[in-house]
Image (cartoon, rainbow, N blue to C red):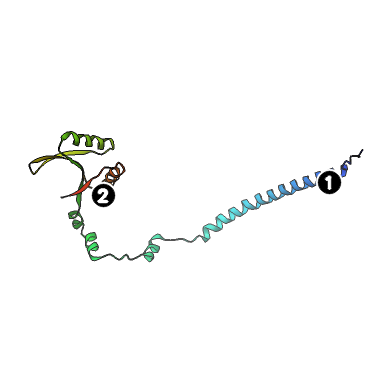
Amino acid sequence: MAKKESTSIWVWAFLLLLLISFVAFILFLDQKIVSSGSGSSKERQSSGSENKPTIDFYSVLPEREVEIPISEEDRDAIENPVINKETTNQSILQVGSFHSVEEADSLKAQLAFLGLEAKIKSAVVNDETWHRVQLGPFASESRLSQAKNLLIENDIKYMQRSLQQ
């Protein structure tokens, strides 16, 4: 039978001594880093405020001014806001036109489920009465495009009409 070889007690003592030395060295470095780190951060704070460049917003901004080319028509519209007010159009969307009021009411209810408020307007065309389902008027482009997107998502055809103010 083979005889088991046991490791010497001196090997275990050497490994234990090596482990203790390593732990002591790590603790020593940790203390050194902590003590040097707190002192240098105070030095950095005091020296950082002295060397910190001051930037004056009002002196830097005019140096960075950029010229944007604008056509004469746009320049006139910017300088004279009355021009802009005159060209503002309100839009309505006509969603359907029916002979019977029931069909128009049905479409109006379908639009109400989508969150759109529709109106039914009657008109006589060539001695026939038509009931038009309309949305609007929309004063802002964002509301108009939201309504258009809802109609497109639900496969509802529409016709956009402008109303002059």
**Image quarter hosting the N terminus:** top right
Q: Is residue 90 left or right of residue 1?
A: left
Q: Is residue 67 above or below residue 111?
A: below
Could you give the CA–CA distance between mark 1 and mark 2, rounded to whole angstroms?
83 Å
Residue 64 image label: none
Rendered location of residue 119, percent (x, y): 19, 38
Rendered location of residue 80, percent (x, y): 20, 59
Quarter of the view holding residue 117: top left
Secondary structure under tag 1 reads: helix
Residue underneath mark 2: 141
Instruction: Please report the residue visible at 77 percent of the width from the left and 45 percent of the height from the top.
Output: 19
Quarter of the view holding residue 59: bottom left
* Residue situated in front as seen by the camera: 94 or 70: 94
Q: Amino acid at mark 1?
A: Phe
Q: Amino acid at mark 2?
A: Glu
Instruction: Please report the residue visible at 24 percent of the width from the left and 34 percent of the height from the top.
Output: 109
* Residue situated in front as seen by the camera: 105 or 15: 105
Residue ranking furthest to the left: 127
* Residue situated in front as seen by the camera: 144 or 103: 103
Secondary structure under tag 2 reads: helix
Rendered location of residue 136, percent (x, y): 21, 43
Count residues near mark 2 (Cα–Cα under 10 Å), then give few for <14, some for 14-19, many for 20+.
Answer: few
* Residue situated in front as seen by the camera: 64 or 139: 139
Q: Nearer the viewer, mark 1 or mark 2?
A: 2
Q: Is residue 91 left or right of residue 58?
A: left
Residue underneath mark 1: 14
- In primary-sequence order, the first of circles 1 and 2 is 1
Number of dots carrying numbers: 2
Count residues near mark 1 (Cα–Cα under 10 Å), then give few for <14, some for 14-19, many for 20+.
Answer: few
Instruction: Please report the residue visible at 25 percent of the width from the left and 46 percent of the height from the top.
Output: 144
